Image (cartoon, helix red, strand yellow):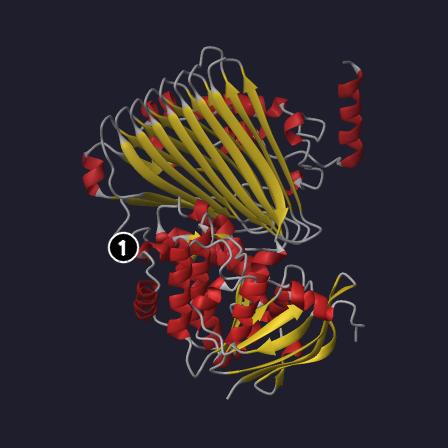
C-alpha cells in the first residue's frame, strides 16, 4: 500500500517560514481534506509536495512509498505517482493537450525503459477520447493549446483529464473548486470520484466546504498558521461551514510556536 | 557632413586591409545575360564594403569577413565536394514534386513534370535559362531586385552561376509544389544565387527553396538575390529555408512585388550560417494586394542572424501581416529590424508586424526594432516586439507531469515556434526543422 507521510515539515519561501511543523499521513484509498483560512500555507503544502523550486524545506521529511521525496525532482515525483491538480494551471502556448499528455505518458515509459518507442498513437487517441467522454469534454479539446485561453472550468477539467490519463497513486487537488460554477464543480467532482478507489489517495485542499458535498472525505484537517491544528471526520467540515474559522483561531491563537 | 566619410575610410584601412573581394570581371559567366551582368559588375566595383556606420549594417559587423580568400567554384567542382544529403531531396508531399532543381557548386540538375512543361511553365536553372530563354530572362531580371540595392546584390547579380527561373504563365495553376535545393559545400568558396519567381496574372504555385551546406572548418560565403513577382489575382506560396553550415557568411537581397488582388504567403526559416544579413521587402503595389511574411530563426553558439524587413503599402486596400519568431542559445545574436511603410494615398491599408524572441541563455542577445512610417491618414497599422526568457512556471508545470527538464524545455520552445511551423505547408520540411530545433536544444 502506498503511503504519503509528511513529518514535521517546515517550509520557507524567501526566508519567510510558511509551514511550521506539519505532519500528515495519507494512505491509498483514503480521501483527506485540508481546510483553512487564506494565507495559512495550504498551497505552500501543495507546491512543496510537488517540488516547486521557490519553496525551501528547512526541516522535516516527506516519505512516499518508503522513498524520500525531497531528494526527487518534480518530474521524478510525478513518475513515482504523485499528482498535483493546480489551482492556477499555466498556459503553454503552442503545445496541444494531446501532444503534452503523450509526452507525459511517454516520459513514464522511457523512465522504465529508455528505448521505449512510446505509446502508439492510435492507442493513445482511443484512451484520450474515452477519458474526455467521461469528463464531458468536447474531443476537439485535445487539439487546443494547453490551458491557453481556457475558461476557469476548462482548466480544471483539463487538470482532472491529466489526472485520469496519468493514473497517480496520490492526488493533491489544490483549490480545484475555485472559480467553478456549480455545473463545472459537479463535473470535476464526478471526474475525481470516478478515479478514486482503493488505488488512489486524495488530498483535497479547499477553502470552502462546498466541494466536500461532492467529494466525500474520510478525514478532515484544519490548517492554521502553517500547521494542522484539528483533525476529524466529515462532520468537522460541516462544523466549519456552520461556525466559520473564528473558533479555531480563538482556540489556537496565542499558542506558542514550536 | 564632410567628416563622416573621412572617418569611415580610416576605419576600413586600419581594421581590415584585406577586406575586399578579389573577384575579377573574368568571373562573369558568359551567357545570355552578359550585358546585365556587366552592368551589375560595374556597380559592384563602386560599392565599398558595408561598415557599421551604415544604418542598415549598424548591428552586423563584417570586419572579420575574409573577403579576399573567396573564389568561385569551377565547373564540376561539386564532384570533389561532399554530396547533397538524400534527405534534402526527398519529395515534399507523399507523391512526387512538380519539379525539382538541385544547384551545386559548378553544376545543377533539373527535373520538371512534362505536364507543366506543356502548360508553358518554366522551371530551370539560370544558366540553362540564359541559353534557352534569353529574351524572357532579360525582360524579367532586375525588375524587382536591382544591383543598385547594395554591394551583395550587385555581386550576386553579376556573378550568379546558380539560380532558378520559375515562370508561371497567365492563369496556370500549378497543383504540385516545386522544390529547389542550393547545396553549397566547400571552404573558401563563394556561392552566388539568383532566384526569379514570376507568377503571371491569375496563376498560382507553391515553391520551396532550401539552401544548405555541411559544417566545415574555415570560411565560405553565399550572396543571393530573390526576385518575386505576383501578378494580378495571382497566388504564390514561397517557402525559403536556410541551414547553411556554421562557417558560411550569408547575404541576401529579396523583394516581392504583388500586383492588384495578388496574394503572397512568404515563409522564412533560418537555422544556419555563421552570419546572415537578409533584406526582405514586400511591395504591395496594386490595390487589394496581400502579403503574409512568417519567419522563424534559431541561433546558437556564436551565430549572428540579421533580418531586415520592409512592408511597403504602395496602393490602397493592401494588407500585410508579418510574424517573425526566434530563439537564441549560447552567445548567439539575432537582429530583426522591420518597417511598415504606407505611401501617400494608400488608404484603407492594414499592416501588422510582430517579432517575438525567446532568449534561452544569458549571453545570447536579441535586438528587435519595429518601425512605422505612415504617409496616409486612413490606415490601420499595429506592431509589437518582445524579447523574453524561458519562464519557470510553465517548466515546473510540465515537470510536475513527469516530463524531464530537457524535454520540458523542448516542448516549450517547440510550442513557441508552433504557430509558424503550422504555416509551413509540408510535413517533411516541418519535421526537418523540428529536428534542427531538437538538435540545437541538445547541443
Residue A78, horizontal then vertical, whole percent = 53, 73
Instruction: Work out whether residue A86 or residue B283 is closer to the camera in this orientation and state it.
Output: A86
Residue B198, horizontal then vertical, whole percent = 34, 28
The answer to whether residue B309 of the structure is visible from this angle is no
Instruction: Work out whether residue B91 or residue B431 is closer to the camera in this orientation and state it.
Output: B431
Instruction: Work out whether residue B243 or residue B382 is closer to the camera in this orientation and state it.
Output: B382
Relative to B290, residue A242 above or below = below
Residue B360, horizontal then vertical, whole percent = 63, 53
Instruction: Say how many tags the image has.
Output: 1
The answer to whether residue B234 of the structure is visible from this angle is yes
Mark 1, chain letter? Answer: B
Relative to B206, residue A39 above or below = below
Relative to B152, residue A201 above or below = below
Label 1: state its secondary structure.
loop
Relative to B117, residue B300 above or below = below
Q: Please name the residue shown 80% across and 27% down the image.
A: B10
Image quadrant in which you'd find residue B125: top left
Look at the image and tell me in which quarter the N terminus of chain B lies.
Answer: top right
Would residue A200 appear left or right of B111 to someone viewing this image? right
Residue matched to label 1: B94
Look at the image and tell me in which quarter the C terminus of chain B lies.
Answer: bottom right
Q: Please name the residue shown 46% across and 47% down the image.
A: A149
Label 1 crowd (10 A; few <14 / some 14-19 / many >=20):
few
Amino acid at each position: 500500500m502506498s503511503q504519503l507521510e509528511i513529518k514535521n515539515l517546515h517550509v520557507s519561501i524567501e526566508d519567510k517560514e510558511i509551514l511550521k511543523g506539519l505532519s500528515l499521513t495519507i494512505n491509498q484509498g483514503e480521501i483527506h481534506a485540508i481546510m483553512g483560512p487564506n494565507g495559512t500555507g495550504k498551497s505552500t503544502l501543495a507546491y512543496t509536495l510537488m517540488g516547486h523550486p521557490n519553496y525551501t524545506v528547512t526541516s522535516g521529511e516527506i516519505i512516499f512509498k518508503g522513498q524520500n521525496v525531497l531528494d526527487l525532482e518534480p518530474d521524478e515525483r510525478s513518475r513515482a505517482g504523485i499528482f498535483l491538480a493546480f489551482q492556477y494551471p499555466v498556459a503553454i502556448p503552442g503545445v496541444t493537450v494531446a501532444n503534452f499528455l503523450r509526452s507525459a505518458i511517454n516520459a513514464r515509459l522511457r523512465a522504465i525503459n529508455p528505448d521505449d518507442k512510446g505509446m502508439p498513437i492510435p492507442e493513445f487517441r482511443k484512451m484520450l477520447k474515452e477519458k474526455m467522454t467521461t469528463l464531458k469534454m468536447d474531443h476537439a479539446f485535445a487539439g487546443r493549446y494547453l490551458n491557453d485561453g481556457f475558461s476557469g472550468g476548462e482548466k480544471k477539467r483539463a487538470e482532472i483529464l491529466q489526472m485520469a490519463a496519468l493514473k497517480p497513486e496520490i492526488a493533491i487537488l489544490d483549490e480545484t473548486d475555485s472559480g467553478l460554477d456549480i455545473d463545472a464543480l459537479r463535473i470535476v467532482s464526478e471526474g475525481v470520484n470516478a478515479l478514486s478507489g482503493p488505488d488512489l489517495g486524495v488530498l483535497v485542499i479547499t477553502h470552502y466546504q462546498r466541494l466536500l458535498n461532492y467529494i466525500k472525505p474520510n478525514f478532515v484537517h484544519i490548517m492554521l498558521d502553517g500547521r494542522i491544528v484539528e483533525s476529524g471526520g466529515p462532520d468537522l467540515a460541516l462544523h466549519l461551514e456552520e461556525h466559520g474559522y473564528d473558533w479555531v483561531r480563538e482556540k489556537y491563537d496565542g499558542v506558542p510556536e514550536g | 557632413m564632410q567628416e563622416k566619410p573621412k572617418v569611415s575610410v580610416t576605419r576600413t584601412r586600419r581594421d581590415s586591409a584585406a577586406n575586399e573581394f578579389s573577384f575579377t570581371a573574368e568571373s562573369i559567366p558568359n551567357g545570355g545575360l552578359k550585358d546585365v551582368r556587366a552592368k551589375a559588375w560595374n556597380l559592384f566595383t563602386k560599392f565599398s564594403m558595408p561598415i557599421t556606420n551604415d544604418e542598415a549594417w549598424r548591428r552586423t559587423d563584417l570586419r572579420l569577413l575574409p573577403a579576399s580568400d573567396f573564389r568561385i567554384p569551377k565547373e564540376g567542382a561539386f564532384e570533389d565536394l561532399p554530396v547533397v544529403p538524400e534527405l534534402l531531396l526527398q519529395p515534399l508531399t507523399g507523391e512526387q514534386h512538380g519539379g525539382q532543381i538541385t544547384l551545386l557548386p559548378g553544376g545543377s540538375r533539373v527535373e520538371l513534370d512534362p505536364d507543366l512543361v506543356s502548360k508553358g511553365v518554366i522551371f530551370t536553372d539560370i544558366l540553362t535559362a540564359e541559353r534557352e530563354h534569353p529574351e524572357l530572362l532579360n525582360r524579367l531580371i532586375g525588375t524587382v531586385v536591382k544591383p543598385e540595392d547594395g554591394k551583395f546584390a550587385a555581386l550576386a547579380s553579376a556573378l550568379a552561376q546558380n539560380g532558378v527561373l520559375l515562370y508561371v504563365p497567365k492563369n496556370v495553376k500549378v497543383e504540385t509544389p516545386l522544390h529547389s535545393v542550393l547545396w553549397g559545400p566547400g571552404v573558401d568558396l563563394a556561392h552566388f544565387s539568383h532566384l526569379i519567381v514570376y507568377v503571371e496574372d491569375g496563376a498560382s504555385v507553391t515553391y520551396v527553396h532550401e539552401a544548405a551546406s555541411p559544417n566545415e572548418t574555415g570560411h565560405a560565403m553565399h550572396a543571393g538575390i530573390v526576385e518575386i513577382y505576383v501578378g494580378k489575382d495571382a497566388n504564390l506560396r514561397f517557402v525559403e529555408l536556410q541551414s547553411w553550415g556554421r562557417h558560411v557568411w550569408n547575404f541576401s537581397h529579396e523583394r516581392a512585388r504583388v500586383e492588384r488582388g495578388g496574394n503572397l504567403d512568404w515563409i522564412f526559416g533560418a537555422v544556419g550560417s555563421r552570419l546572415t544579413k537578409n533584406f526582405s521587402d514586400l511591395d504591395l503595389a496594386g490595390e487589394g494586394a496581400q502579403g503574409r511574411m512568417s519567419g522563424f530563426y534559431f541561433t546558437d553558439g556564436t551565430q549572428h542572424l540579421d533580418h531586415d524587413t520592409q512592408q511597403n503599402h504602395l496602393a490602397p486596400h493592401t494588407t500585410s501581416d508579418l510574424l517573425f519568431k526566434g530563439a537564441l542559445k549560447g552567445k548567439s545574436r539575432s537582429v530583426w529590424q522591420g518597417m511598415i511603410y504606407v505611401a501617400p494615398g494608400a488608404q484603407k491599408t492594414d499592416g501588422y508586424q510582430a517579432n517575438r524572441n525567446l532568449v534561452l541563455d544569458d549571453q545570447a542577445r536579441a535586438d528587435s526594432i519595429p518601425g512605422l512610417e505612415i504617409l496616409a491618414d486612413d490606415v490601420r497599422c499595429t506592431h509589437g516586439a518582445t524579447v523574453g526568457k524561458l519562464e519557470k512556471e510553465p517548466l515546473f508545470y510540465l515537470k510536475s507531469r513527469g516530463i524531464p527538464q530537457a524535454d520540458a524545455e523542448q516542448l516549450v520552445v517547440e510550442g513557441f515556434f508552433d504557430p509558424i511551423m503550422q504555416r509551413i505547408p509540408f510535413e517533411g520540411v516541418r519535421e526537418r526543422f523540428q529536428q534542427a530545433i531538437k538538435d540545437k536544444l541538445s547541443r
